[in-house]
Image: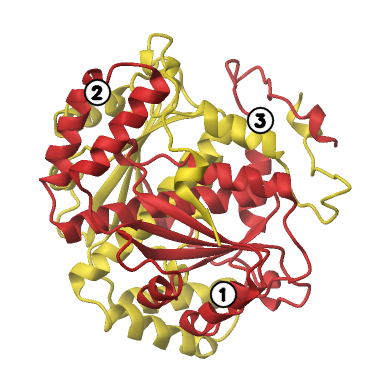
Chain colours: A red, B yellow
Amino acid sequence: MPRATLSRIQTPDFARSMATTSPESLIQQLQWRYATKQFDPQQKIAPEVWAALEQSLVLTPSSYGMQPWKFIILSGNAELRERLVPHSWGQRQVADASHFVVFTVRTEVTTSDVETYVERIAEVRQIDKSAVDPLKKMIEGGIVKGLSASQQHDWATRQAYIALGNFMTSAALLGVDTCPMEGIVPAKFDEILGLKGSGYATCVACAAGFRANTDKYAQLPKVRYSAQQVIEHR
Amino acid sequence: MPRATLSRIQTPDFARSMATTSPESLIQQLQWRYATKQFDPQQKIAPEVWAALEQSLVLTPSSYGMQPWKFIILSGNAELRERLVPHSWGQRQVADASHFVVFTVRTEVTTSDVETYVERIAEVRQIDKSAVDPLKKMIEGGIVKGLSASQQHDWATRQAYIALGNFMTSAALLGVDTCPMEGIVPAKFDEILGLKGSGYATCVACAAGFRANTDKYAQLPKVRYSAQQVIEHR
């Protein structure tokens, strides 16, 4: 089906529907995805598809909307990516996938971060900065003063995991394979990527591209607990 | 367009495409979503749509595939939901949204958790448990012995944030509004939901349903940093 014919789904039981994906398609894609171990290095993500995935990262929701992150994208740069492999338990996804995303977050959250954020709000919404003062005070109280630097880093890291979840689901919907990677040495990544002293630190990574025909993991049944085991209705 | 006509997208530049959503539709939906402050209490999520969202939670990827979580779903139960409102800074989304999801995670990760998990792998993949021994030892080394109880709890919490990201994106694709909620008092939630001593604790929550026509936040321009500010290409 050509893309142009995709439009909002209208069903009688879901009259105000803003959906562009059916429940069946969503589940099919989430079933299709798996942590790809072997990527086909020849298969590159099409530019317009990658642009949407980058945009999905930009659009990720975060606590207070603070976006305490930077996403580092490695697409070419074979030399740099090869240098990361030994600090990823030798996993080849780092070098072989079409794209490799390093999720980095603020190591602490300062008044200046909050200032930059409220300036952005004022800019985007074309309002006076003073109108955002209550929010500014709330974030300063809750995060800047309310948490230690280490807790701020943890808080920022949790936000990056929202981005990771959003990214993998977005990729699955677009037919792009991913492999989330916690098995990396963040300090070594920071060193190699020149992040030391930048105020940002690596927390997690994700490879994106297309599975190799030879990846035996693609054929294994997905292991999840049953809904009865992880969902409780109250 | 009736759901049955939705099928995989085939474009010349993306020949092996497994996509069911176009890049444009994905971004449109991620732009459409926002942290809904006011839900229409009369609008309920259709059962087949909710079933898919529950399934999206079940299918969420996690570190080692461990799924250290339970998702507590409140759909009816007005009395219980009203009791959570004062512990959510009075935010009415808790009570008014069609569904309210409380994300809970293991407060520590034990050998017994790993045992249960490898048994599940053996069951699903119909293999002998001994075949999963290397993975079992890796998880025991990395998480059970390698991390303190508090670090295990943090690790589990980060996994839940992947589920949160996946859930919100899945909902957006299905035309369902969400509001992620960190502004809750987890200890009070645990008390009210009877989680004390269960080995699970509340970490975050998310309301899901449909925006009220009167929610002024729906009209505000979304505030995100530009791609230039949060994406770096190397």
Q: CA distance from mark 1 to mark 2?
A: 42 Å
The chain carrying label 1 is: A
The N terminus of chain A is located in which quarter? top right
Q: Say if residue A15 shows up in the picture.
A: yes
Picture coordinates of residue B127 (x, y %)?
A: 59, 82
Query: Three-letter amino acid code at disc 3?
Result: Thr
Q: Nearer the viewer, mark 1 or mark 2?
A: 1
Query: Three-letter amino acid code at disc 2?
Result: Val
Query: Do labels 3 and 1 touch, CB within 8 Å?
Result: no
Q: Nearer the viewer, mark 3 or mark 1?
A: 1
Residue nearer the viewer, A198 or A131 = A198
Picture coordinates of residue A85 (x, y %)?
A: 54, 80
Left/right of residue B83 with respect to residue B22 in the rendered view? left
Picture coordinates of residue B70 (x, y %)?
A: 35, 54
Disc 3 target residue:
A20
Q: CA distance from mark 2 to mark 3?
A: 34 Å
Q: Residues within 10 Å of mark 3 (few under 14, many from 20)?
A: many
Quarter of the image for residue A215 reads bottom right
Callout 1: SS = helix
Callout 3: SS = loop
Q: Nearer the viewer, mark 2 or mark 3?
A: 2
Residue nearer the viewer, A221 or A51 = A51
Q: Which mark is residue A132?
A: 2
Reading the chain from its start, which is encountered first: label 2 or label 3? Answer: 3
Callout 2: SS = helix
Query: Three-letter amino acid code at disc 1?
Result: Leu
Residue for point 89% across, 47% down: B12
Disc 1 target residue:
A80
Reading the chain from its start, which is encountered first: label 1 or label 2? Answer: 1
Residue for point 21% across, 59% down: B198
- Residue B152 vertical placement versus B11 (above, below): below
